Amino acid sequence: MPFDDESSIRYPSQPPPISDGKNPHVMIVGAGLAGLLLGILLDKAGIPYQIYERAKEVKPLGAVMSLNAGILPALEQLGIYEDLLKLSLPVTGTFNIYNSDMTLTLAPKNITAQVIGYDHIVFPRPEFYDLLLSKVPREKIHFSKKVMSMEQNKEGVMIRCADGSTYHGDVLVGADGAYSGVRQALYRRMDKAKILPTSDSDQLNKGYICMVGTTKSLDPAKYPGLDSDAANINQVISKDSLYSWSAFSVPGNRICWNVKLQLATVEEATDHKFRNSEWGPETSEPMIQQVRDFRVPFGNNTLGDLIDATPRENISKVFLEDKLFDTWNHGRTVLIGDACHKLLPSAGLGAVTAMQDAVVLANCLYEMRGLSLDDIASALDDFKNERFAKSYFERFMRMIVFNCLPESVKMKGGYKGVEFRPQASFIPQIPVRGSGPVLPQKPSLRYQAEQARLKVGEPSPIVI
């Protein structure tokens, strides 16, 4: 496969994959939630793939995570939903917002499962990550593969990793997070060709530092409400500082907590981005000392009490920002999740939108009519066209979610936020639940044809 080298050094290269003539060979960079889910979906679609992860080993970090009806039907399709419920608590308990003096300022009503069909659920992120990881064959994931550059042409796409190895495929998916190596490599090439939009090279806005953790099992007598069958969610927004913090109860009498600091200037944000772009416990100690005395709404306790009850290796800190890129795809390369639309975790939307990306992209790849560059580029354009407008709406919802709107308006906004519920188009659909509105999904012509063949006894390539 002739590519233009960026270096005169020749590295060992894996041979190009052999296509079956019907499905593209997909290279997924990033073994995060979106990358793993995309792999699971491609398995079901019978589309060959490999996942390349820059870390040396899997070490899922993070604290509480929440999912809603926007993605739960797809997880139910894949047989993951029931297992996830065993790790979760429904958000049918308290949901309170406090000032730093513990004065209750807002208690939003939960949208009922009767209306939307599913309870909003919360759970520890590492446990959900392990669940997804267990569904991906280990031989499909390659570790210590940090992408340094990429090249693409009419014949295929190639990635070059920091260890000197190269890999080839038909489609490259950047699912490698907010500091995506695939995005950076793609944008460098587009910028060199003078086709990168100016907005995608703009300086960052102000960002946030976020520290998260999950405690060990705690005494419900000291932390009232901890042993409830429903999640207790408490958010504290300080009037007197740039800090805000949260505490969520999860199964096992544990509390997932997080604390966020809004950075005051763009310069400060740029500095923190450079020093804290990776999840990890190493840089947490200074922030721990700054927030120890902050009160939390679980009894007469503080963040320091929760931090002391959390193993240090389970505490991590990262720089966060909120940005929607204009360029999601070019040629054979496409970005999903935080690689193209970064959402702050407090929005409760980032994981949902990233996994929705995976579902929609899998559908677009499955529906491709051929394997030419034009076919692939068209499929990736279809993906962006479907997802970009929805991501813009999700950013808008994040900005207004805590504004002082009438309760009826908030409820309507909540319903609208879960109207879009993409499911895999190539396996049986989960019936619509709840009395609320759900956007119709475009049916798969390929899947319908495959099912027709099955009825007359012809073999089908679909993996169900």
Image: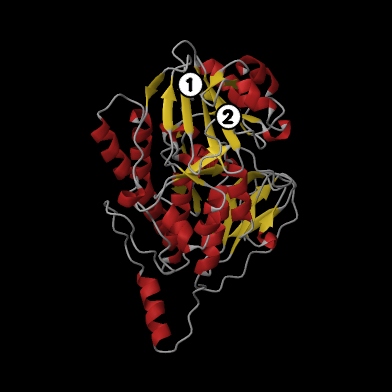
State the residue lying farthest toward the bottom. 457
Q: Which residue matches tag 1?
A: 206
Q: Position of residue 316 (x, y in %)?
A: 65, 31
65 or 371, which lies in front? 65
Disc 1 residue type (three-letter):
Lys
Q: Is mark 2 on a helix, strand or loop?
A: loop
Name the front one of labels 2 and 1: 2
**Residue 114 in sight:** yes
Residue 18, compared with residue 385, is above or below; it is below
Q: Which residue matches tag 2?
A: 223
Q: Position of residue 55 (x, y in %)?
A: 70, 44
Contact check, label 2 and label 1, Cβ < 8 Å:
no
20 or 219, which lies in front? 219
396 or 324, which lies in front? 396
Q: Is mark 1 on a helix, strand or loop?
A: loop
Give whichever of discs 2 and 1 has the lower sequence position.
1
Query: What residue is shown at x 74% (from left), y 52% (from top)?
Result: 11
Residue 407, compared with residue 104, is above or below; it is below
**Residue 320, numbered circle:** none
Query: What residue is shown at x 70% (from left), y 30% (from top)?
Result: 281
249 or 339, which lies in front? 249
Q: Is residue 3 left or right of residue 360?
A: right
Q: In this view, does 262 lie to the left or right of 131?
A: left
The picture quadrant where one finds residue 369 is bottom left
Disc 2 residue type (three-letter):
Tyr
State the residue lying farthest toward the top. 240
